[in-house]
């Protein structure tokens, strides 16, 4: 059974995460020809202070974008 782990910075709402899980599962099934019921997909959330994107801490980038 295939496993897919999605690691993202905390801060996404529940609706966003549910849609992400649903779409990833569906597309992985379509691409591989494996039944969707075989996939295990989960999200691991990391605090935004512990993620670096392009040399910038995610929490700092989000703070800057909200100004």
Image: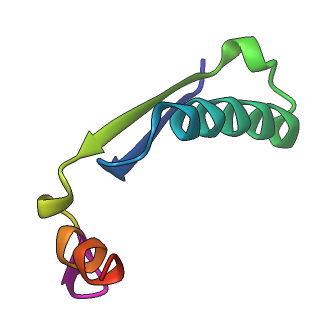
* Structure colour scheme: rainbow
Rendered image quadrant of residue 24: top right
Position of 16 compared to 19: left or right? left
Seen from the viewer's position, the closer of residues 7 and 31 is: 7
How far across and how far down the image is residue 37, in percent?
A: 73, 11
How far across and how far down the image is residue 3, in percent?
A: 52, 28
Residue lying furthest bottom:
55
Which residue corresponds to the image point at 42% horizontal and 46% vertical from the top-left?
12
Position of 13 compared to 2: left or right? left
Q: How many marks?
A: 0
How far across and how far down the image is residue 27, in percent?
A: 79, 40
Magenta-colored span? 52-58
Which residue corresponds to the image point at 37% horizontal and 47% vertical from the top-left?
7
Residue 45 magenta: no
Which residue corresponds to the image point at 72% horizontal and 37% vertical from the top-left?
23
Rendered image quadrant of residue 54: bottom left
Seen from the viewer's position, the closer of residues 10 and 32 is: 10
Name the quadrant of the C terminus.
Answer: bottom left
Q: Is residue 16 above or below residue 21?
A: below
Residue lying furthest left:
49
Position of 13 compared to 44: left or right? right
How far across and how far down the image is residue 35, in percent?
A: 81, 18
Name the quadrant of the N terminus.
Answer: top right
């Amino acid at each position: 059974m295939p496993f897919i782990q999605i690691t993202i910075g905390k801060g996404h709402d529940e609706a966003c995460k549910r849609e992400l899980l649903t779409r990833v599962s569906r597309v992985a099934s379509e691409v591989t020809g494996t039944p969707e019921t075989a996939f295990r997909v989960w999200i691991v959330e990391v605090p935004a202070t512990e993620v670096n994107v392009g040399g910038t801490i995610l929490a700092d980038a989000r703070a800057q974008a909200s100004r």
